[in-house]
Image (spheres, rainbow, N blue to C red):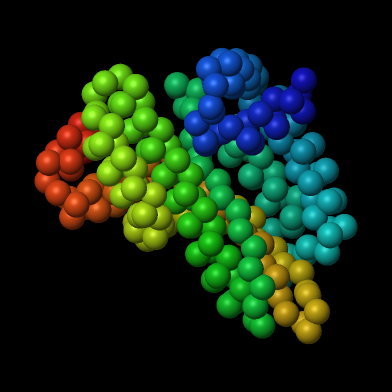
Amino acid sequence: MKKLIFITLSMFLIYPPAYSQDVDQIMKDRKEIARMTKSELDARASKSARKEAKKYERDGWQVAPGQLPLERQLDRTYRMQYELDDNFLPKYILSEAMSIGETYDAAKLQAMELAKLNLAGQMQSQIVALVENEVRNSQLPQEDAVSATQTIMGSRNEIAQSIGRVITVVECYRVKSGKNKEVRVQIACPSDMAMQSAKSAIREELQRDGERLSEKLDSMLGL
């Protein structure tokens, strides 16, 4: 059951599920997590981090001098994944990416950019789900929804640039053929901050498409 809870959280923490039974199960699992004491969650996170760190090391991942050991980095990741707000929603959005470069710094920079783009993609999915919900509730005409969705799905770069500062929770590397470095990073951003940045970036794009649609979506986006 413990393993099931963690898998469910990691798969569905951010993306809106497709079926109502998924929503019910996710909320049930989140409430069970919320009922656990801090010491119980810390123990679970530490156990998962130890197991994951061993897998990383078997695959050749290591940390640069001055970085925290892998186990401690992963422990922080698991703790963040367990943090929920009063509505049983995740406090943080996490995103991971890898990149290969001739130098460590070049590979890290590219991995960070890819991780931000992945995070932006998660925000896109959330906002598209809001639009679809408005259509189901007959608050937004289908043709406006199509136009808004096209704008949202075309604004990933703008969202990534608007997110700003993120927390690097995992940073490690391994040496590839030709002595190239493969860097792996995982970043986190407070959910409310990420959503606000994404909404603001999308609103600017919508305004370029026309004031009428922008005004219609202002209340829906909470701006």
Q: Is residue 171 above or below residue 24?
A: below
Taking the spot 73% from the left edge, 80% from the top edge, the residue there is 180
Q: Nearer the viewer, residue 126 or 80?
A: 126
Taking the spot 28% from the left edge, 32% from the top edge, the residue there is 142
Name the residue furthest right.
Answer: 58
Q: Nearer the viewer, residue 164 or 110?
A: 110
Image coordinates for residue 2, horizontal then vertical, percent: 76, 24
Give the side of residue 102 with respect to residue 115, left or right: right
Image coordinates for residue 109, horizontal then vertical, percent: 54, 71
Taking the spot 58% from the left edge, 39% from the top edge, the residue there is 80
* Quarter the C terminus occupies: top left
Taking the spot 26% from the left edge, 21% from the top edge, the residue there is 138
Asked which quadrant contains residue 77, the reply is top right
Q: Is residue 127 above or below residue 189?
A: above
Asked which quadrant contains residue 33, the reply is top right
Name the residue furthest left.
Answer: 211
Total marks in image: 0
* Quarter the N terminus occupies: top right
Q: Residue 70: tell me if it is visible.
A: yes
Name the residue furthest front.
Answer: 143
Image coordinates for residue 187, horizontal then vertical, percent: 55, 53
Q: Is residue 177 above or below residue 169?
A: below
Q: Residue 163: tell me if it is visible.
A: no
Give the side of residue 100 with respect to residue 196, left or right: right
Q: Nearer the viewer, residue 114 or 81?
A: 114
Q: Nearer the viewer, residue 192 or 45?
A: 192
Give the side of residue 116 with respect to residue 59, left or right: left
Image coordinates for residue 65, horizontal then vertical, percent: 71, 71
